[in-house]
C-alpha cells in the first residue's frame, strides 16, 4: 500500500498545560496553527530538554495521545529524534526517526493489535528502496521500490488470500502500465483505477441526507439551547461496514452520543479499493445540532459531506 493511512484527526475539552510544559498549541487537519474552536488536535512541548531536545506530544482534543517525539527548535518547530504515532487504543501505530525535520531511516507501521502493517526506508524525507505492506493475516499486500519518493520498476499488489490483485510497472520517461486481476486469478477487463473510495448506497448526497434525516436533536441539549457541531471519525472497513466510530470534537454528552449513534447506524458501503485490494478508509464528518430555524443564527446550515482523513509525515 503506497499510501498509509493513519488517523491523527481527533477532538473535546483540552487540559491546561502545567509544570514545565509550554502553553498548548492548537493545530488543524493540515498541522497549521489555529484557534481552539477550529483545532483537530493540539501540541504540548516541554521546556526542560532531554539530551539537547525538547520533548513534545500531540493529543486529540479529548486528550488521547496521538504522537510523541522531540524538537530541536520550538519556534519554528524542527523535528528531531524518534517519533512514535499511536492508535486510539494506545498501541503503537508508527515509528520513524527524524533528522533536520525530515524522516530518516527505517519506518515501521503497525495494526492496533501490534502486527506489522508496513515497513520501508526514508532518506532526507523521501521514500527509498524496497517497501513492503502486509495484510492483517500476514499475507503480502504490496511490495515494490521507491527512488527519491517515486515508485519505480515493478510494484505488485495482493489480495488477503495471496492471489495477485495488480501489477504496475513504471520506467523513467514512460507512462505507468497497470494491470488488475480478479480474485479468481482472471484479468480484470474494466477500466483500471488505482484508488476507489467506498460508495454509500445512492451516493454522497444520499449519505448526507441519511445523516440529516436520522439525527435527533437531544431533548436536554434543546432545553439548554446547546447548538453546534460534533465532529465524528469513522472507518469504512474492507468489508464496507462502518466501525471505529469516535467523537473528535464534542459539544455535550447527549449530542456526542447521538452523533456517534447516527454515524454507527450507517448502512453498509460498497468497499473502497486501492489497486483492486479492498481497503479501509477513515473519514471525519460534522453532525450539526440546532433547531431548523434559530432566532439569532438564521436557518440551520446545510449538512456537510464527510472528509477523508489522511496523514503523512
Image: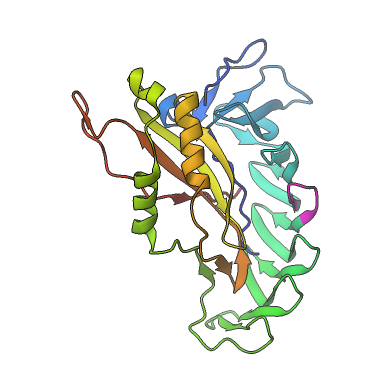
Q: Is residue 135 visible?
A: yes
- Asked whether, in this view, residue 245 is left or right of residue 229, the answer is right
Q: Magenta stretch: give its range.
A: 108-116
Does 282 appear above or below 130? above
Q: Is residue 29 visible?
A: no
- Asked whether, in this view, residue 13 is left or right of residue 296, the answer is right
> Does the magenta portion include 184?
no
How many marks are shown on the rendered structure? 0
Q: Quadrant of residue 131?
A: bottom right
- Asked whether, in this view, residue 145 is left or right of residue 256, the answer is right
Does 197 appear above or below 225? below
Residue for point 71% across, 38% down: 89
- The way the protein has been coloured in the rendering is rainbow
Q: Position of residue 192 (x, y in %)?
A: 52, 80
Q: Give whichever of 20, 248 is nearer the camera.
A: 248
Q: Give whichever of 104, 254 is nearer the camera.
A: 254
Residue furthest out toward the top: 19
- Quadrant of the image for the N terminus? bottom right
Q: Position of residue 82 (x, y in %)?
A: 75, 39
Q: Quadrant of residue 161?
A: bottom right
> Does the magenta portion include 112?
yes
Residue for point 34% across, 19% down: 223
Residue furthest out toward the front: 219
Q: Give whichever of 88, 127 is nearer the camera.
A: 88
Q: Position of residue 171 (x, y in %)?
A: 61, 81
Residue for point 76% across, 52% down: 108
Q: Position of residue 307 (x, y in %)?
A: 44, 50
Does 221 appear above or below 16? below
Residue for point 51% across, 75% down: 193
Amino acid at each position: 500500500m503506497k499510501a498509509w493511512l493513519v488517523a491523527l484527526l481527533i477532538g473535546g475539552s483540552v487540559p491546561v498545560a502545567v509544570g514545565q510544559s509550554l502553553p498548548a498549541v492548537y493545530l488543524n487537519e493540515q498541522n497549521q496553527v489555529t484557534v481552539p474552536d477550529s483545532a483537530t488536535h493540539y501540541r504540548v512541548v516541554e521546556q526542560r530538554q532531554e539530551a539537547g531536545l525538547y520533548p513534545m506530544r500531540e493529543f486529540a482534543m479529548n486528550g488521547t495521545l496521538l504522537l510523541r517525539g522531540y524538537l530541536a527548535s520550538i519556534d519554528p518547530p524542527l523535528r528531531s529524534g524518534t517519533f512514535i504515532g499511536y492508535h486510539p487504543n494506545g498501541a503503537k501505530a508508527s515509528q520513524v526517526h527524524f533528522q533536520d525535520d525530515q524522516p530518516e531511516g527505517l519506518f515501521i507501521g503497525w495494526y492496533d493489535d501490534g502486527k506489522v502493517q508496513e515497513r520501508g526506508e526514508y532518506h532526507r524525507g523521501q521514500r527509498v528502496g524496497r517497501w513492503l505492506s502486509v495484510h492483517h493475516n500476514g499475507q503480502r499486500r504490496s511490495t515494490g521500490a521507491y527512488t527519491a519518493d517515486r515508485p519505480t520498476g515493478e510494484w505488485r499488489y495482493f489480495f488477503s488470500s495471496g492471489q495477485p490483485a495488480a501489477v504496475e510497472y513504471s520506467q523513467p520517461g514512460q507512462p505507468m502500465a497497470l494491470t488488475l486481476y480478479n480474485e479468481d486469478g482472471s484479468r480484470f477487463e474494466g477500466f483500471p483505477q488505482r484508488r476507489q473510495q467506498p460508495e454509500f448506497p445512492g451516493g454522497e448526497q444520499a449519505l448526507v441526507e441519511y445523516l440529516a434525516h436520522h439525527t435527533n436533536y437531544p431533548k436536554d441539549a434543546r432545553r439548554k439551547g446547546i447548538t453546534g457541531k460534533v465532529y465524528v471519525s469513522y472507518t469504512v472497513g474492507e468489508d464496507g461496514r462502518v466501525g471505529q466510530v469516535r467523537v473528535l470534537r464534542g459539544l455535550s454528552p447527549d449530542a456526542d452520543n447521538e452523533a456517534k449513534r447516527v454515524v454507527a447506524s450507517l448502512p453498509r458501503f460498497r468497499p473502497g479499493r486501492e489497486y483492486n485490494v479492498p481497503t479501509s478508509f477513515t473519514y471525519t464528518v460534522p453532525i450539526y445540532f440546532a433547531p431548523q430555524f434559530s432566532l439569532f443564527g438564521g436557518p440551520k446550515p446545510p449538512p456537510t459531506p464527510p472528509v477523508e482523513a489522511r496523514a503523512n509525515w
